[in-house]
Image (tube, rainbow, N blue to C red):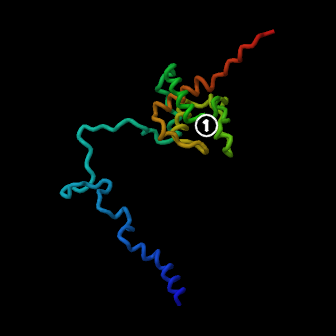
Amino acid sequence: MRKISLALALLLAPALAQAWPWSQDMANQVSIKPQESVDPANPGMVPFPKRSIPVPGTMTLVPDAAAAEKLKNPVPATEESIKKGGELFAIYCVPCHGKAGKGDGYVGHKLILQPYDLSADQTKQRTDGFIWGYITFGGAVMPIYGNDLNPTERWHVVNYIRNVIEKPQAAPAEAKK
């Protein structure tokens, strides 16, 4: 009988432990909830201050990739833009597409579908807006980078792809016999 009582007590112990005061849900505590006012006379979310403006970020007015395809690149392909695009390409694109954009990056080798070859003729035939939209909205395998890169940074990456990845690399200078 003593063993049965002990077993029953052990089985009920977890249920009884839930009744202790420290096991209350953290959402049910005395605190200010999101969009809740501290002032009981004015409940609700505090309005934005007068004359406030939104901070530039990753928001875009382009609704989808089809609309992005018609966009013209507003960022001139200057040396500075291409350099910035190269830095961003190294961070966000090289893991899958590889340094030369061939789709042979370290992560790209592990994927079932190989990443797209950015130096291919098909890429050259696409508009700048298409590439920008693909970066922004992602694709079948490619993740969305519209949250990581602001619109201008995405145009810098497009400039890098157009001016470095798509250009044929110069053959190494070898002694000609």
According to the image, label 1 marks what residue? 95
Q: Position of residue 77 (x, y in %)?
A: 51, 22
Q: Is residue 17 left or right of residue 31?
A: right
Q: Position of residue 72 (x, y in %)?
A: 49, 28
In this view, the residue farthest toward the left is 41
Q: Residue 127's image quarter?
A: top right
Instruction: Please report the residue visible at 58 percent of the width from the left and 23 percent of the height from the top.
Output: 163
In this view, the residue farthest toward the front is 2
Specify the amino acid type for callout 1: Pro
In this view, the residue farthest toward the top is 177
Q: Residue 120's image quarter?
A: top right
Instruction: Please report the residue visible at 45 percent of the width from the left and 76 percent of the height from the top.
Output: 15
> As rendered, which of 126 and 60 lies closer to the eye?
60
- Helix, strand, or loop for circle 1? helix
Instruction: Please report the residue visible at 67 percent of the width from the left and 29 percent of the height from the top.
Output: 121
Crowd rating for badge 1 (residues with CA inside 10 Å; few <14, some 14–19, many 20+) = some
Q: Position of residue 76 (x, y in %)?
A: 48, 22
Quarter of the picture holding the C terminus: top right
Q: Is residue 11 above or below residue 142?
A: below
> As rendered, which of 74 and 54 lies closer to the eye?
54
Q: Is residue 11 above or below residue 177?
A: below
In this view, the residue farthest toward the right is 177
Q: Is residue 103 left or right of residue 69?
A: right
Q: Is residue 78 above or below residue 38?
A: above
Q: Is residue 50 left or right of residue 111?
A: left
Q: Is residue 43 above or below residue 139?
A: below
Instruction: Please report the residue visible at 33 percent of the width from the left and 38 percent of the height from the top.
Output: 54
